[in-house]
Image (cartoon, rainbow, N blue to C red):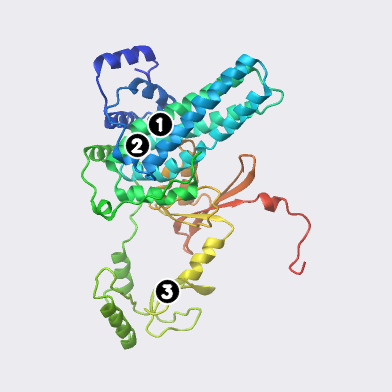
Amino acid sequence: MLHNGGSFEAAKKIFDETFDQVDVSEITNAERQLIATGLNPMEIQTLCNVHAAVFRGKINNNSKTPTEEIPGHPVQVLKLENTVIMSLLNDELLPTLKKWQQAGSDPELLTRMQHALADLMKIDKHYLRKENLIFPLMTKYGITAPPKVMWGVDDEIRGWIKAALKLVNTQPTPEPYDIEAAIEKAAKEVDEMVFKEEEIMLPMDLEIFTAADWAMIQHESDAIGYTLIAQPLPWQPTEAELAVKPKPSKMAQELNAMAEDLAKSQHLASDRKPKPTDRDVLKEIHQDVPMPIAPAETLAKLQAAKTEDGDNDVHKPSISVQRPKPKRRHAGPDVFGAATSGTDSGRIEIDGIHPARVLLPTGAMDLEQLTNVLRLLPLDLTFVDDTDTVRWFSDSGERVFPRTTAVIGRLVKDCHPPKSVDKVEKILSDFHAGREDHADFWINLHGEKMIYIRYFAIRDPEENYLGCLEVTQDISEIQKLDGEKRLGD
Protein backbone atom coordinates (compact mmCIF):
# COMPACT_ATOMS: atom_id res chain seq x y z
CA MET A 1 0.00 0.00 0.00
CA LEU A 2 2.77 2.42 0.93
CA HIS A 3 4.82 1.63 -2.18
CA ASN A 4 1.77 2.30 -4.30
CA GLY A 5 1.50 5.80 -2.85
CA GLY A 6 -1.06 5.07 -0.12
CA SER A 7 -1.51 7.18 2.99
CA PHE A 8 0.97 6.53 5.78
CA GLU A 9 -1.58 7.24 8.49
CA ALA A 10 -4.06 4.82 6.88
CA ALA A 11 -1.39 2.12 6.60
CA LYS A 12 -0.31 2.65 10.21
CA LYS A 13 -3.94 2.40 11.37
CA ILE A 14 -4.49 -0.85 9.43
CA PHE A 15 -1.27 -2.31 10.82
CA ASP A 16 -2.11 -1.40 14.44
CA GLU A 17 -5.60 -2.80 14.15
CA THR A 18 -4.52 -6.02 12.45
CA PHE A 19 -1.24 -7.02 14.09
CA ASP A 20 -0.03 -7.22 17.66
CA GLN A 21 3.69 -7.84 17.07
CA VAL A 22 6.00 -8.45 14.12
CA ASP A 23 9.21 -10.51 14.10
CA VAL A 24 12.46 -9.17 12.69
CA SER A 25 12.57 -12.09 10.25
CA GLU A 26 9.16 -11.09 8.87
CA ILE A 27 10.38 -7.57 8.11
CA THR A 28 13.47 -8.96 6.40
CA ASN A 29 11.45 -11.50 4.41
CA ALA A 30 9.03 -8.80 3.27
CA GLU A 31 11.83 -6.59 1.95
CA ARG A 32 13.51 -9.57 0.28
CA GLN A 33 10.29 -10.56 -1.45
CA LEU A 34 9.82 -7.01 -2.71
CA ILE A 35 13.29 -7.13 -4.27
CA ALA A 36 12.68 -10.65 -5.67
CA THR A 37 9.59 -9.41 -7.49
CA GLY A 38 11.64 -6.77 -9.27
CA LEU A 39 11.51 -3.76 -6.94
CA ASN A 40 14.77 -1.80 -7.00
CA PRO A 41 16.50 -1.74 -3.57
CA MET A 42 16.89 2.01 -4.06
CA GLU A 43 13.09 2.32 -4.04
CA ILE A 44 12.84 0.39 -0.78
CA GLN A 45 15.53 2.69 0.56
CA THR A 46 13.42 5.79 -0.07
CA LEU A 47 10.59 4.38 2.04
CA CYS A 48 12.80 2.70 4.63
CA ASN A 49 11.93 5.25 7.31
CA VAL A 50 8.23 4.82 6.57
CA HIS A 51 8.59 1.08 7.17
CA ALA A 52 10.42 1.73 10.43
CA ALA A 53 7.74 4.19 11.56
CA VAL A 54 5.00 1.63 10.88
CA PHE A 55 6.81 -1.07 12.84
CA ARG A 56 8.05 1.13 15.68
CA GLY A 57 6.79 -0.18 19.00
CA LYS A 58 5.55 -3.41 17.44
CA ILE A 59 8.78 -5.37 16.92
CA ASN A 60 8.80 -8.53 18.98
CA ASN A 61 12.27 -8.80 20.51
CA ASN A 62 13.86 -8.08 23.84
CA SER A 63 16.10 -5.07 23.27
CA LYS A 64 18.09 -5.79 26.44
CA THR A 65 20.22 -8.88 26.01
CA PRO A 66 23.21 -10.08 28.01
CA THR A 67 25.44 -9.74 24.94
CA GLU A 68 24.98 -6.01 24.62
CA GLU A 69 26.12 -5.50 28.22
CA ILE A 70 29.52 -7.16 27.72
CA PRO A 71 32.16 -4.38 27.64
CA GLY A 72 33.98 -4.32 24.31
CA HIS A 73 31.58 -6.69 22.54
CA PRO A 74 30.81 -5.25 19.08
CA VAL A 75 27.10 -5.05 19.90
CA GLN A 76 27.80 -3.11 23.10
CA VAL A 77 30.17 -0.81 21.19
CA LEU A 78 27.64 -0.06 18.46
CA LYS A 79 24.92 0.68 21.01
CA LEU A 80 27.27 2.83 23.09
CA GLU A 81 28.09 4.89 19.99
CA ASN A 82 24.37 5.23 19.25
CA THR A 83 23.77 6.48 22.79
CA VAL A 84 26.42 9.16 22.38
CA ILE A 85 25.17 10.09 18.90
CA MET A 86 21.60 10.49 20.15
CA SER A 87 22.84 12.58 23.08
CA LEU A 88 24.71 14.81 20.62
CA LEU A 89 21.48 15.31 18.71
CA ASN A 90 19.00 15.68 21.56
CA ASP A 91 21.14 17.37 24.19
CA GLU A 92 23.26 19.68 22.05
CA LEU A 93 22.49 20.11 18.34
CA LEU A 94 18.68 20.40 18.34
CA PRO A 95 18.42 22.49 21.56
CA THR A 96 21.14 24.82 20.27
CA LEU A 97 19.30 25.17 16.96
CA LYS A 98 16.14 26.17 18.83
CA LYS A 99 18.00 28.74 20.96
CA TRP A 100 19.72 30.16 17.87
CA GLN A 101 16.37 30.61 16.13
CA GLN A 102 14.91 32.34 19.17
CA ALA A 103 17.92 34.61 19.59
CA GLY A 104 17.76 35.74 15.98
CA SER A 105 21.52 36.04 15.50
CA ASP A 106 24.02 34.67 18.00
CA PRO A 107 27.54 33.86 16.74
CA GLU A 108 28.29 31.73 19.80
CA LEU A 109 25.26 29.50 19.22
CA LEU A 110 26.10 29.25 15.51
CA THR A 111 29.63 28.12 16.44
CA ARG A 112 28.18 25.46 18.73
CA MET A 113 26.05 24.11 15.87
CA GLN A 114 29.11 24.06 13.63
CA HIS A 115 31.03 22.01 16.20
CA ALA A 116 28.09 19.67 16.83
CA LEU A 117 27.65 18.93 13.13
CA ALA A 118 31.40 18.42 12.73
CA ASP A 119 31.19 15.85 15.52
CA LEU A 120 28.17 14.24 13.88
CA MET A 121 30.20 13.82 10.67
CA LYS A 122 32.29 11.32 12.66
CA ILE A 123 29.36 8.91 12.36
CA ASP A 124 31.19 7.82 9.21
CA LYS A 125 33.38 5.49 11.33
CA HIS A 126 30.28 3.86 12.82
CA TYR A 127 28.84 3.26 9.37
CA LEU A 128 32.17 2.09 7.91
CA ARG A 129 32.47 -0.65 10.55
CA LYS A 130 28.91 -1.73 9.86
CA GLU A 131 29.42 -1.76 6.09
CA ASN A 132 32.84 -3.43 6.06
CA LEU A 133 32.48 -5.89 8.95
CA ILE A 134 28.82 -6.67 9.63
CA PHE A 135 27.38 -6.50 6.12
CA PRO A 136 29.86 -9.06 4.67
CA LEU A 137 28.85 -11.56 7.33
CA MET A 138 25.16 -10.93 6.74
CA THR A 139 25.74 -11.56 3.04
CA LYS A 140 27.65 -14.74 3.88
CA TYR A 141 24.60 -16.06 5.71
CA GLY A 142 22.31 -15.14 2.83
CA ILE A 143 20.87 -11.93 4.29
CA THR A 144 21.38 -9.64 1.31
CA ALA A 145 18.40 -7.26 1.25
CA PRO A 146 18.96 -5.38 4.56
CA PRO A 147 22.64 -4.57 3.81
CA LYS A 148 21.76 -3.22 0.36
CA VAL A 149 19.01 -1.01 1.73
CA MET A 150 20.88 0.17 4.84
CA TRP A 151 24.10 0.96 2.97
CA GLY A 152 22.19 3.21 0.61
CA VAL A 153 20.53 5.00 3.54
CA ASP A 154 23.93 5.37 5.27
CA ASP A 155 25.23 7.22 2.24
CA GLU A 156 22.18 9.48 2.20
CA ILE A 157 22.69 10.30 5.89
CA ARG A 158 26.31 11.21 5.23
CA GLY A 159 25.05 13.56 2.53
CA TRP A 160 22.41 15.21 4.77
CA ILE A 161 24.95 15.84 7.55
CA LYS A 162 27.48 17.24 5.07
CA ALA A 163 24.84 19.54 3.57
CA ALA A 164 23.82 20.86 7.01
CA LEU A 165 27.44 21.43 8.00
CA LYS A 166 28.08 23.33 4.78
CA LEU A 167 25.09 25.60 5.44
CA VAL A 168 26.12 26.58 8.97
CA ASN A 169 29.62 27.39 7.70
CA THR A 170 28.44 29.49 4.74
CA GLN A 171 29.00 33.25 4.79
CA PRO A 172 26.83 35.21 4.81
CA THR A 173 24.67 32.99 7.00
CA PRO A 174 21.77 31.46 4.99
CA GLU A 175 18.12 31.88 5.93
CA PRO A 176 17.35 30.36 9.36
CA TYR A 177 14.60 28.21 7.84
CA ASP A 178 17.08 26.57 5.43
CA ILE A 179 19.45 25.75 8.28
CA GLU A 180 16.59 24.44 10.41
CA ALA A 181 15.31 22.19 7.63
CA ALA A 182 18.78 20.77 6.88
CA ILE A 183 19.64 20.04 10.52
CA GLU A 184 16.25 18.52 11.34
CA LYS A 185 16.42 16.32 8.23
CA ALA A 186 19.87 15.03 9.17
CA ALA A 187 18.83 14.46 12.80
CA LYS A 188 15.67 12.59 11.79
CA GLU A 189 17.56 10.30 9.40
CA VAL A 190 20.21 9.51 12.04
CA ASP A 191 17.50 8.75 14.62
CA GLU A 192 15.72 6.40 12.23
CA MET A 193 18.94 4.55 11.43
CA VAL A 194 19.67 4.04 15.14
CA PHE A 195 16.25 2.44 15.45
CA LYS A 196 16.86 0.16 12.44
CA GLU A 197 20.26 -0.93 13.75
CA GLU A 198 19.12 -1.71 17.28
CA GLU A 199 15.66 -3.13 16.62
CA ILE A 200 16.18 -4.91 13.30
CA MET A 201 19.82 -5.44 12.33
CA LEU A 202 21.45 -6.37 15.65
CA PRO A 203 18.74 -8.82 16.82
CA MET A 204 19.03 -10.51 13.43
CA ASP A 205 22.83 -10.68 13.68
CA LEU A 206 22.71 -12.00 17.24
CA GLU A 207 20.48 -14.78 15.97
CA ILE A 208 22.89 -16.04 13.32
CA PHE A 209 26.44 -14.76 14.00
CA THR A 210 28.82 -17.09 15.84
CA ALA A 211 31.27 -16.14 18.58
CA ALA A 212 34.04 -16.38 15.97
CA ASP A 213 32.15 -13.90 13.77
CA TRP A 214 31.90 -11.36 16.60
CA ALA A 215 35.58 -11.94 17.44
CA MET A 216 36.52 -11.12 13.84
CA ILE A 217 34.45 -7.92 13.98
CA GLN A 218 36.12 -6.89 17.23
CA HIS A 219 39.61 -7.67 15.90
CA GLU A 220 39.15 -5.63 12.73
CA SER A 221 37.34 -2.66 14.30
CA ASP A 222 40.35 -0.76 15.65
CA ALA A 223 41.76 -0.27 12.15
CA ILE A 224 38.60 1.56 11.07
CA GLY A 225 38.03 3.53 14.26
CA TYR A 226 35.10 4.58 16.41
CA THR A 227 32.57 7.40 16.61
CA LEU A 228 32.71 9.79 19.57
CA ILE A 229 33.92 7.15 22.06
CA ALA A 230 37.32 6.08 23.32
CA GLN A 231 38.82 2.84 22.07
CA PRO A 232 36.72 0.11 23.71
CA LEU A 233 38.00 -2.45 26.16
CA PRO A 234 39.40 -5.54 24.45
CA TRP A 235 36.91 -8.40 24.23
CA GLN A 236 37.39 -11.97 23.11
CA PRO A 237 35.03 -14.93 23.31
CA THR A 238 35.96 -17.74 25.64
CA GLU A 239 37.26 -21.06 24.37
CA ALA A 240 33.92 -22.59 25.32
CA GLU A 241 32.05 -19.99 23.25
CA LEU A 242 34.31 -20.55 20.26
CA ALA A 243 33.80 -24.30 20.55
CA VAL A 244 30.03 -23.96 20.18
CA LYS A 245 29.09 -24.82 16.62
CA PRO A 246 26.49 -22.72 14.82
CA LYS A 247 23.09 -24.07 15.70
CA PRO A 248 20.43 -24.40 13.01
CA SER A 249 18.45 -21.20 12.97
CA LYS A 250 14.96 -21.01 11.54
CA MET A 251 15.63 -17.40 10.59
CA ALA A 252 18.93 -18.21 8.87
CA GLN A 253 17.39 -21.16 7.02
CA GLU A 254 14.51 -19.05 5.77
CA LEU A 255 16.79 -16.22 4.72
CA ASN A 256 19.26 -18.53 2.98
CA ALA A 257 16.47 -20.23 1.05
CA MET A 258 15.08 -16.87 -0.02
CA ALA A 259 18.55 -15.69 -0.98
CA GLU A 260 18.89 -18.66 -3.32
CA ASP A 261 15.50 -17.95 -4.87
CA LEU A 262 16.47 -14.31 -5.27
CA ALA A 263 19.76 -15.23 -6.95
CA LYS A 264 17.94 -17.50 -9.40
CA SER A 265 15.20 -15.00 -10.14
CA GLN A 266 17.65 -12.18 -10.84
CA HIS A 267 20.33 -14.38 -12.44
CA LEU A 268 22.83 -13.29 -9.80
CA ALA A 269 24.48 -16.68 -9.52
CA SER A 270 27.75 -16.85 -11.43
CA ASP A 271 27.60 -18.80 -14.69
CA ARG A 272 31.37 -18.97 -14.89
CA LYS A 273 33.15 -22.27 -14.41
CA PRO A 274 34.14 -22.96 -10.79
CA LYS A 275 37.71 -22.48 -9.65
CA PRO A 276 39.69 -25.75 -9.65
CA THR A 277 40.22 -27.34 -6.26
CA ASP A 278 43.65 -28.28 -4.87
CA ARG A 279 42.87 -31.89 -5.78
CA ASP A 280 42.21 -30.88 -9.40
CA VAL A 281 45.49 -28.94 -9.54
CA LEU A 282 47.54 -31.81 -8.09
CA LYS A 283 45.95 -34.27 -10.52
CA GLU A 284 46.90 -32.00 -13.43
CA ILE A 285 50.46 -31.56 -12.13
CA HIS A 286 51.22 -35.21 -11.53
CA GLN A 287 49.22 -36.67 -14.41
CA ASP A 288 48.92 -40.01 -12.57
CA VAL A 289 52.73 -40.31 -12.29
CA PRO A 290 53.83 -41.55 -8.82
CA MET A 291 55.20 -38.77 -6.67
CA PRO A 292 58.96 -38.96 -5.97
CA ILE A 293 60.20 -39.47 -2.45
CA ALA A 294 61.90 -36.56 -0.73
CA PRO A 295 65.68 -36.85 0.00
CA ALA A 296 66.73 -38.84 3.06
CA GLU A 297 68.04 -35.80 4.95
CA THR A 298 64.73 -33.97 4.44
CA LEU A 299 62.73 -36.98 5.62
CA ALA A 300 64.97 -37.22 8.70
CA LYS A 301 64.29 -33.60 9.62
CA LEU A 302 60.56 -34.13 9.10
CA GLN A 303 60.64 -37.23 11.30
CA ALA A 304 62.51 -35.33 14.02
CA ALA A 305 59.95 -32.53 13.90
CA LYS A 306 57.16 -35.10 14.03
CA THR A 307 58.65 -36.79 17.09
CA GLU A 308 59.29 -33.47 18.85
CA ASP A 309 55.71 -32.40 18.25
CA GLY A 310 54.36 -35.55 19.82
CA ASP A 311 52.91 -36.85 16.55
CA ASN A 312 50.19 -34.22 16.74
CA ASP A 313 48.21 -34.38 13.50
CA VAL A 314 47.22 -30.74 13.83
CA HIS A 315 50.79 -29.51 13.67
CA LYS A 316 52.30 -32.34 11.64
CA PRO A 317 54.76 -30.90 9.09
CA SER A 318 54.20 -31.82 5.48
CA ILE A 319 55.95 -31.44 2.16
CA SER A 320 54.60 -31.30 -1.37
CA VAL A 321 56.68 -32.46 -4.32
CA GLN A 322 56.25 -32.37 -8.09
CA ARG A 323 57.58 -34.28 -11.05
CA PRO A 324 60.15 -31.85 -12.52
CA LYS A 325 59.54 -30.62 -16.05
CA PRO A 326 62.47 -30.65 -18.50
CA LYS A 327 64.34 -27.49 -19.49
CA ARG A 328 62.88 -25.46 -16.63
CA ARG A 329 65.15 -22.71 -15.41
CA HIS A 330 64.75 -20.34 -12.53
CA ALA A 331 66.57 -17.53 -10.79
CA GLY A 332 68.60 -18.32 -7.70
CA PRO A 333 70.59 -21.38 -6.61
CA ASP A 334 69.20 -24.88 -6.99
CA VAL A 335 67.91 -26.49 -3.81
CA PHE A 336 68.52 -30.22 -3.63
CA GLY A 337 65.27 -32.10 -3.30
CA ALA A 338 63.17 -28.96 -3.35
CA ALA A 339 59.46 -29.20 -3.95
CA THR A 340 58.16 -26.83 -6.58
CA SER A 341 54.81 -25.82 -7.96
CA GLY A 342 53.70 -23.32 -10.57
CA THR A 343 54.56 -22.50 -14.17
CA ASP A 344 57.52 -21.16 -16.10
CA SER A 345 56.24 -17.65 -15.42
CA GLY A 346 56.43 -18.15 -11.67
CA ARG A 347 56.95 -20.90 -9.09
CA ILE A 348 57.01 -21.57 -5.38
CA GLU A 349 59.99 -23.50 -4.06
CA ILE A 350 59.91 -25.41 -0.76
CA ASP A 351 62.67 -27.61 0.64
CA GLY A 352 61.11 -28.29 4.03
CA ILE A 353 63.91 -26.43 5.81
CA HIS A 354 64.19 -22.86 4.51
CA PRO A 355 61.37 -20.33 4.10
CA ALA A 356 59.31 -20.90 0.98
CA ARG A 357 60.61 -18.91 -1.97
CA VAL A 358 58.57 -17.32 -4.77
CA LEU A 359 60.53 -17.59 -8.03
CA LEU A 360 59.47 -15.04 -10.63
CA PRO A 361 60.79 -14.46 -14.15
CA THR A 362 62.93 -11.52 -12.97
CA GLY A 363 64.12 -12.76 -9.57
CA ALA A 364 63.08 -14.42 -6.32
CA MET A 365 61.98 -13.52 -2.78
CA ASP A 366 60.99 -15.60 0.20
CA LEU A 367 57.46 -15.18 1.54
CA GLU A 368 58.49 -12.84 4.35
CA GLN A 369 60.31 -10.54 1.95
CA LEU A 370 57.42 -10.55 -0.52
CA THR A 371 54.86 -9.87 2.22
CA ASN A 372 56.76 -6.85 3.49
CA VAL A 373 57.45 -5.49 0.01
CA LEU A 374 53.71 -5.52 -0.69
CA ARG A 375 53.04 -3.96 2.71
CA LEU A 376 55.34 -1.02 1.96
CA LEU A 377 54.03 -0.15 -1.49
CA PRO A 378 52.72 3.47 -1.52
CA LEU A 379 49.53 2.15 -3.13
CA ASP A 380 46.40 0.38 -1.95
CA LEU A 381 45.95 -2.81 -3.94
CA THR A 382 42.95 -5.14 -4.09
CA PHE A 383 42.81 -8.30 -6.20
CA VAL A 384 39.47 -9.61 -7.49
CA ASP A 385 39.63 -12.99 -9.25
CA ASP A 386 37.94 -14.12 -12.45
CA THR A 387 34.72 -14.98 -10.56
CA ASP A 388 34.55 -11.34 -9.35
CA THR A 389 35.39 -12.45 -5.81
CA VAL A 390 37.76 -10.46 -3.56
CA ARG A 391 40.82 -12.61 -2.81
CA TRP A 392 43.51 -10.29 -1.46
CA PHE A 393 44.30 -6.72 -0.49
CA SER A 394 47.45 -4.93 0.60
CA ASP A 395 47.62 -3.35 4.01
CA SER A 396 50.08 -0.57 4.76
CA GLY A 397 48.10 0.44 7.85
CA GLU A 398 47.09 3.73 6.20
CA ARG A 399 44.67 2.79 3.44
CA VAL A 400 42.63 5.47 1.66
CA PHE A 401 39.48 3.34 1.92
CA PRO A 402 39.04 0.75 4.68
CA ARG A 403 39.50 -2.91 3.88
CA THR A 404 38.97 -5.74 6.38
CA THR A 405 39.48 -9.48 6.12
CA ALA A 406 35.69 -9.82 6.15
CA VAL A 407 35.69 -8.93 2.43
CA ILE A 408 37.86 -11.91 1.48
CA GLY A 409 35.69 -14.38 -0.41
CA ARG A 410 32.94 -11.81 -0.93
CA LEU A 411 31.59 -10.89 -4.37
CA VAL A 412 32.93 -7.46 -5.25
CA LYS A 413 29.43 -6.18 -6.07
CA ASP A 414 28.53 -6.71 -2.41
CA CYS A 415 31.45 -4.53 -1.30
CA HIS A 416 30.00 -1.32 -2.75
CA PRO A 417 26.97 0.82 -1.90
CA PRO A 418 23.92 0.32 -4.15
CA LYS A 419 24.53 3.54 -6.09
CA SER A 420 27.93 2.26 -7.26
CA VAL A 421 27.15 -1.40 -8.01
CA ASP A 422 26.05 -0.90 -11.62
CA LYS A 423 29.23 1.03 -12.42
CA VAL A 424 31.47 -1.65 -10.88
CA GLU A 425 29.60 -4.41 -12.73
CA LYS A 426 29.98 -2.51 -16.02
CA ILE A 427 33.77 -2.28 -15.55
CA LEU A 428 34.08 -6.00 -14.75
CA SER A 429 31.76 -6.96 -17.62
CA ASP A 430 33.96 -5.00 -20.04
CA PHE A 431 37.07 -6.70 -18.63
CA HIS A 432 35.55 -10.18 -18.98
CA ALA A 433 34.46 -9.49 -22.55
CA GLY A 434 37.83 -8.01 -23.52
CA ARG A 435 36.28 -4.65 -24.42
CA GLU A 436 38.48 -2.74 -21.96
CA ASP A 437 41.78 -3.31 -20.18
CA HIS A 438 41.66 -0.51 -17.61
CA ALA A 439 39.44 2.19 -16.13
CA ASP A 440 40.63 5.35 -14.35
CA PHE A 441 38.87 7.67 -11.90
CA TRP A 442 39.93 10.49 -9.61
CA ILE A 443 37.99 12.12 -6.78
CA ASN A 444 38.49 14.98 -4.36
CA LEU A 445 37.91 13.21 -1.04
CA HIS A 446 36.25 15.50 1.51
CA GLY A 447 38.04 18.44 -0.09
CA GLU A 448 41.25 17.23 1.57
CA LYS A 449 42.84 14.58 -0.67
CA MET A 450 43.00 13.90 -4.39
CA ILE A 451 42.52 10.16 -4.85
CA TYR A 452 43.47 8.36 -8.07
CA ILE A 453 41.66 5.02 -8.56
CA ARG A 454 42.59 2.64 -11.36
CA TYR A 455 41.22 -0.75 -12.35
CA PHE A 456 43.32 -3.11 -14.47
CA ALA A 457 42.25 -6.32 -16.21
CA ILE A 458 44.76 -9.11 -15.52
CA ARG A 459 45.32 -11.53 -18.39
CA ASP A 460 47.79 -14.32 -19.07
CA PRO A 461 49.90 -14.45 -22.26
CA GLU A 462 47.05 -16.31 -23.99
CA GLU A 463 44.69 -13.42 -23.09
CA ASN A 464 42.67 -15.49 -20.63
CA TYR A 465 41.07 -13.23 -18.02
CA LEU A 466 42.51 -13.88 -14.54
CA GLY A 467 40.94 -11.07 -12.55
CA CYS A 468 41.04 -7.37 -11.75
CA LEU A 469 43.54 -5.30 -9.81
CA GLU A 470 42.25 -2.16 -8.10
CA VAL A 471 44.97 0.43 -7.42
CA THR A 472 44.17 3.41 -5.19
CA GLN A 473 46.65 6.20 -4.47
CA ASP A 474 46.58 9.51 -2.63
CA ILE A 475 48.25 11.81 -5.17
CA SER A 476 47.83 15.05 -3.20
CA GLU A 477 51.55 15.42 -2.49
CA ILE A 478 52.51 14.30 -6.00
CA GLN A 479 50.42 17.12 -7.47
CA LYS A 480 52.47 19.62 -5.45
CA LEU A 481 55.80 18.53 -6.99
CA ASP A 482 57.64 21.21 -8.92
CA GLY A 483 61.05 21.43 -10.56
CA GLU A 484 63.49 18.61 -9.84
CA LYS A 485 65.09 16.77 -6.96
CA ARG A 486 67.91 14.52 -8.09
CA LEU A 487 69.46 11.63 -6.20
CA GLY A 488 72.49 13.68 -5.26
CA ASP A 489 70.53 16.70 -4.01
Check disc 1 and give the amino acid type: Pro
Check disc 2 and give the amino acid type: Leu
Q: Nearer the viewer, mark 2 or mark 3?
A: 2
Q: Which mark is residue 198?
A: none
The image quadrant that residue 315 belongs to is bottom left
Q: Report how far apart the C-alphas of labels 1 and 3 lie in the structure.
A: 47 Å
- The disc, 1 or 3, on the residue closer to the chain's N-terminal end is 1
Left or right: where 246 falls relative to 48? left
Q: Quadrant of the N terminus?
A: top left
Q: How many marks?
A: 3
The image quadrant that residue 71 belongs to is top left
Label 2, on which residue? 202
Label 1, on which residue? 41
Up the image or down, 37 lies above or below 365; here it is above
- The disc, 2 or 3, on the residue closer to the chain's N-terminal end is 2
Q: Nearer the viewer, mark 1 or mark 3?
A: 3
Asked if the residue at tag 2 contacts the one at tag 1, i.e. Cβ–Cβ closer than 8 Å, the answer is no
Label 3, on which residue? 356
